[in-house]
Image (cartoon, helix red, strand yellow):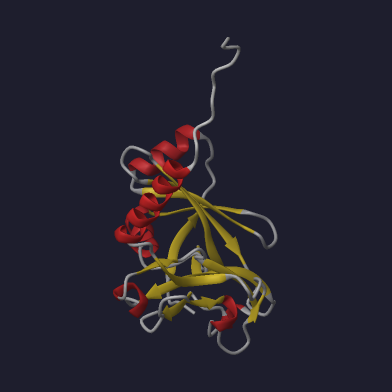
Amino acid sequence: MSNVVFSAKTRMDFGSAKSVRLRKQGRVPGIIYGKGAAVAIDLDGRELSAHLRTISESTIVKIDVDGKTHDAFVKSTQRNIQDGNILHVDFYEIEMGKLLRARVSVHITGNPIGVRDGGILETPLHDIEVECFPKDLPERINIDISNLGVNQSIHVRDLALGNGVKLISAEDQVVALVKFAKSEAESAGEGEEAAATEAATPAKDTKSGEKS
């Protein structure tokens, strides 16, 4: 589990004008929901931005609201499309002693042998779904693909999840694979073969109705 702690205050004033005033003060309005009644809050904008750069979607953070601690995920953020500043943040609260399902990102590292041999790397899957207690939830799953050769692949079933983590996603999904790429020479050869085949095929007589 992470050690990220957000300091927040209970937000009593609502509405667009109030939110604009908060942002001018360097604070960001937000909400905590998922366990009991939703709690409206506001947080320090700089602290929020700094922490968001270091966590993933499956990172469990603590939110200290006027002395009361909430364990939660950062569920979503709304940003200004012009300057990228955070306008609003949603937290999803969890119960530490209760099983949960969450999506965990798959982080790929390494340069596959197969790519150095001329293959093409494909990574169709970027996260998986797991079930576990919050204390066992990984922030991300790291996988080194350096030894992946041409025509080799890594599936979800090959991932190391850790004790207490149950896989929910389909085991046969491909996480990474390296496959051969057609060389320019092969492509040119196929083009020449197609042209030769076309030249050898008799042309159809499109003339009709001619008198002898």
**In the image, is 174 to the left or to the right of 82?**
right
Residue 39 horizontal side relative to residue 183, left or right = right
Q: Position of residue 193 (x, y in %)?
A: 40, 52
Q: Is residue 47 above or below residue 18?
A: below
Q: Residue at x 59, y 16 (%)?
A: 208
* Residue name at image x 30 percent, y 60 percent: 185
Quadrant in which the C terminus is drawn: top right
Q: Is residue 61 above or below residue 191?
A: below
Q: Nearer the viewer, residue 200 or 61?
A: 200
Question: Looking at this rendering, what residue extends furthest in the front direction?
Answer: 212
Residue in the foreground of this view, choosing between 133 and 208 = 208
Front-most of 29 and 149? 149
Q: Position of residue 202 (x, y in %)?
A: 50, 37
> Is residue 65 rendered to the left or right of residue 80?
right
Which quadrant of the structure image shows residue 142? bottom left
Q: Position of residue 163 (x, y in %)?
A: 59, 90
The one nearer the camera, 87 or 69, is 87
Q: Toward which corner of the image does residue 147 lie, by quadrant?
A: bottom left
Which quarter of the figure has residue 115? bottom left
Identify the residue at image location x=60%, y=77%: 134
How many marks overall? Answer: 0
The percent position of residue 201, horizontal first and vertical second, equals 49, 41
Is residue 167 visible from the viewing direction of this image?
yes
